[in-house]
Amino acid sequence: MATRGIDFARLSLKDALDLAIFIEEEAKERYEDFASQMETHHTPDSARFYKFMAGNEEKHRAELAERRGKLFPKDPVTVSRQMLFDVEAPDTDEARTFMTPRQALTVALRCEEKAWAFFDGALKVIKDAGVKELFTELRQEEVEHQDLVKAELAKLPADDRFKTEDFEDEPVSHD
Amino acid sequence: MTLAMPAPVPTLQAKDFRSDLKPIWCPGCGDFGVVQAVYRALAAVGRPPHEIAFISGIGCSSRIPGYTTAYGFNSVHGRALPIAQGIKIAHPELLVLVAGGDGDGFSIGGGHVAHAVRRNIDLTYIVMDNQIYGLTKGQLSPTSPRGLKTVTSMYGSLEEPLNPLMYVLSYGAPFVAQGTPADLPGLTAMLEEAIRYPGFSFVNIQSPCVTYGEESGQIKAQKEKMKALADMKHDPTDRIKALSLAQDYGRELYTGVFFRDPNPPPTYDALVKARQAELSANALPRQNILDLFLQK
Amino acid sequence: MTTDLVIGMAGSGGDGIVSAGESLIAAVATEGYHAMMTKSFGSQIRGGESSCRVRLSTEPVLNPGGTLDVAIALNWEDFLKFGGELPVGGNTIVIYESKTGVAPDKLPLPGVTPAEVFPVPIADMAKESAKTDKAKNTVILGLIAGWFGIGGDGVMKGLRKKLAKKGPELLEANERALAAGRKYAQDHPLKTPRVMERPKTVSPKLLTDGNDMCGAAAIFSGCQFFGGYPITPSTEIMQFLSREIWKYGGSVLQAEDEIAGIGAAVGASFAGKKAMTATSGPGMSLKTEMLGLATIAELPLVLVNVQRGGPSTGLPTKTEQADLYQAAFSAHGDVLRPVLAPTCVADTFEITVEAFNMAEMYQTPVVILSDQEISQRKETCDPIDTSKFRLVDRLRPANSELGTHYARYRFTESGISPISEPGMPGGNYLAAGIEHNEKGAPISGGIMHAKMNEKRFRKLNPIRTRRDLFQTYGDPNAPLALIAWGSVAGVAREALRVAERKGVKVKLLVPRLLYPIAEEFFNDFLSGVQAGLVVEQSHQGQLYHIMKMVLDLPKGLKSYARSGANPFQPAEIVRRLREQAQAMHQSGDSMPQEE
Ligand SMILES: Cc1ncc(C[n+]2csc(CCOP(=O)(O)OP(=O)(O)O)c2C)c(N)n1
Ligand code: SF4
């Protein structure tokens, strides 16, 4: 239930583009938040990965924004990000203190799969040919992203067999 | 709920309510979702941050005002509601939000809840209910289930949990809802509605603690078991029905509005204003106040 | 050979620095050393920066020590966040994770040239030996064992116990990490060896912190009820009791707030049981009302207030001594409430037993004013001979006193009236917060009120003559004096040692009864004193001002006070003391020359 109130059957190309931009923007911000959480909680490797993901999302956002600018240079935005939370962005609870890069990548992979499912579902109701084309393209991109993340995952060494809990300090009481 | 497309674009954006302070919350804490929903709900309501007073007690969850751009007051443990009531009565034009944990609200601050409810002061009280004490390292909370083993209940708790929904409903709160960061659109809509409601509104948020909470309370588990009251065709104007559903707190996870009084009773702050207007008509001029003691 | 070593380490919570410290202190305790460990953390709940200091010695350790002998940084950024808590000096051996990329001659320690610097590939060694870089903390324990000859096998013994349930894989990994650290140390000897001298005798030691010690003492004293509410840094008392007290027929109530917590304890005391509550600053503020009730109803009660930085939420995890006024004076009406302060973990046992005895003997609430440092630091102590303690029970009425003529608040010579309890036939009475007559019936007249006040004050007179609640050190005829209480007393005792070594004649008074002021005893100590300092960790210097209120202080006795979380060092106390003496001398007052 990542979004509310989008009537895909009546979605125009302009609104669809804006929506796609918001989806990327949301994902970028969530990854930035995660990176910052990892930094404040001494989990630097995963912080680096989340920053990398934020960079990717920003790149996609910029590409879409450029397209939107060319197609509809003057038309105002009429959709909002209000009810859009985690189409492509990870759920707010997916980060963990001391998560390994492998765990961080797994989160990202799930997100790409989730985004694929979103576009796939939407495509079943979309009528507008232009929107259909855009969403088909975006759905395909998600496949590529999945492959990218999977390739990264394959490069990572396996996590070792030990749990951080068996070495780390106890949590601290603050009041 | 369906937003008509094209949707109105709020003039204020969620980011306008987000401060630069970095949360100390543990990654994965439910409160991260709650604060996102709060940003959006406030953007939807559309009052600028400087017209909002956001009051809290002490606890992990009570850090939330600092993460917004509103005027914040991170007060003392259990006393957010008294302070918030003072603010609202003294300055009724402000939008007043109150937030805290289950311990802050229903243990040490429990006595204040009933009185804020019965006064029907127009504010929104958000409890991030994680059934544990987070900030002090995992002790029993008033909403912890019976039998829970914690550092202060080594051999299992001997007490029944308190039911926040019943508590607030039975004192007559005109707006009572329950949400979860497992459904952020739902939570956002509910918060917006609560804030807009003219009177005391209460939102219990099942916001899990990843560090000390039970597995069964985490977002993943919640997604499995949550049931939207709207899907159950619950009529939120029926207080008795709401009470009956609220009894399932702790067993079932219902989300949505339990009760919304369709005829909002007058608020205390409105009554104060009316009384001030009525009585000020025949007041002595301030500089003549001592004439009250004049022997004629 | 080294006889005293202060090790400070810092890293992230994930590095397990503090848990390494815990393993180390447990191990050296079994080797017969005296040791003390303090910890400090960043503001995150889990995954923040963390640090600890372990000081060990062949002699009793009085305080956590000043400049480090050994500084271990897994990460410089984290290490530096602890600033003055982990001071590095010219005599320090610095060991750090070489992965940090900092060159040994470019340490981020401006103005300091450490004695020796070792960049060690700690994470790589962990990975190689234990197959996980998480075992960094165990490698560090190996390095310490190798270079300083401490821990080592004791650490392994401890880990075997701790990890017994986790299976052999984890244990073996730790074993290999420890061996790797030891080997590295052997291959890279220190220029100037600093192997710790072995203690002359190895006797079994206790190892615990002030909060657990307080809980154990409560059980020993016969405490049957604890009512409280979690608050840092006192929560562990409740946690300890909630594990142990049931075994002795007692119980713990985690109440809905501090008022309810102390309220239930007052109730348990009325019911005839020894009862206790514990809290810290913000909770103490809430308990004031019930303390007044216990005073006028003359009910025994022990309240532990573990001080943290205030006011309000203040510095919840740091130590301060700014709650003395509150402990002594937070009341309306005429109230005299004894305040006792332990000076270290071992002393917490004695002071807690004393508090229960005093509460029972005089039917009054007694405050134990501990502080964050004592309550949460770990310390070795020699076994305490519990047979030397006499436990006091409240004076109960004889059978002949019971019946319709029983007067709960009977005026007696001592001011102590025999107290009955529900269930005792013929002892029925009304306990109340309202002023009452001897039989407990409410009154509103001035004459009876004055008599009752007089009785409630008179009964406490004997505690002012309790010399055993004061410790003195140094030359009794010294013209220079130090006065310190609570955790600062340990620093002052070391300052005295430093001064004596320099030939400065000083004496030290450590009051463990802070209120009421034992006038006679203070005056005895202060007679002949020409200059001195009352050393306290608060902005105001609260004991100094209470002393000033009650006593005629020598002109040269001044307050040396500063806000909490800024620990005193022995050397600076001595410096300040000499300055004070100098100032007195210059102002024309005769002052014997030192040195
Ligand atoms: C008077 C007082 N008593 C106790 C405390 C310590 N304290 C701080 S937060 C807290 C409870 C935290 O639990 P909750 O309110 O449920 O919030 P959470 O941290 O779980 O979000 C306690 C006991 C305090 N700050 N003040
Ligand atoms: S301790 Fe629990 S409630 Fe507090 S921040 Fe961490 S996860 Fe959240």
Image (cartoon, coloured by chain):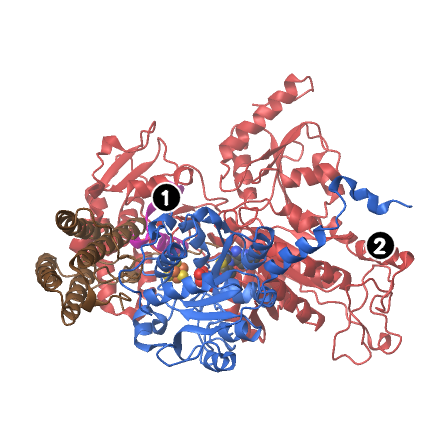
The residue that disc 1 covers is C8
Secondary structure state at the residue bearing disc 2: helix
Residue C211 seen from this side: no
Secondary structure state at the residue bearing disc 1: strand
Q: Residue C359 versus residue B110: which sits nearer the camera?
A: B110
Left-right relation of B22 to A46:
right
Report the mark closest to the observer, 2 or 1.
2
Q: Is residue A5 magenta?
A: no
Q: Which mark is residue C517?
A: none
Q: Residue A39 versus residue C419: which sits nearer the camera?
A: A39
Q: Position of residue B287 (x, y in %)?
A: 76, 39
Q: What colour denotes chain C?
A: red
Q: Which residues are magenta?
A: C1-30
- For the N terminus of chain B, the quadrant is bottom left
Q: Quadrant of residue A95?
A: bottom left
Left-right relation of B79 to C24:
right
Residue occupying image coordinates x 57% and y 52%: B87
- The vertical placement of A130 against A51, above or below, is below
The residue that disc 2 covers is C454
Amino acid type shown at disc 2 = Glu
Q: What colour denotes chain A?
A: brown
Amino acid type shown at disc 1 = Gly
Q: Earlier in the sequence, mark 2 or mark 1?
A: 1
Q: Position of residue C452 (x, y in %)?
A: 85, 58
Residue occupying image coordinates x 65% and y 52%: C340
Left-right relation of C79 to A14:
right
Q: Is mark 1 within 8 Å of ligand 2?
A: no
* Ligand 2 falls in quadrant: bottom left
- The vertical placement of C502 against C129, above or below, is above
Q: What colour denotes chain B?
A: blue
Residue C402 seen from this side: yes
Q: Chain of mark 1?
A: C
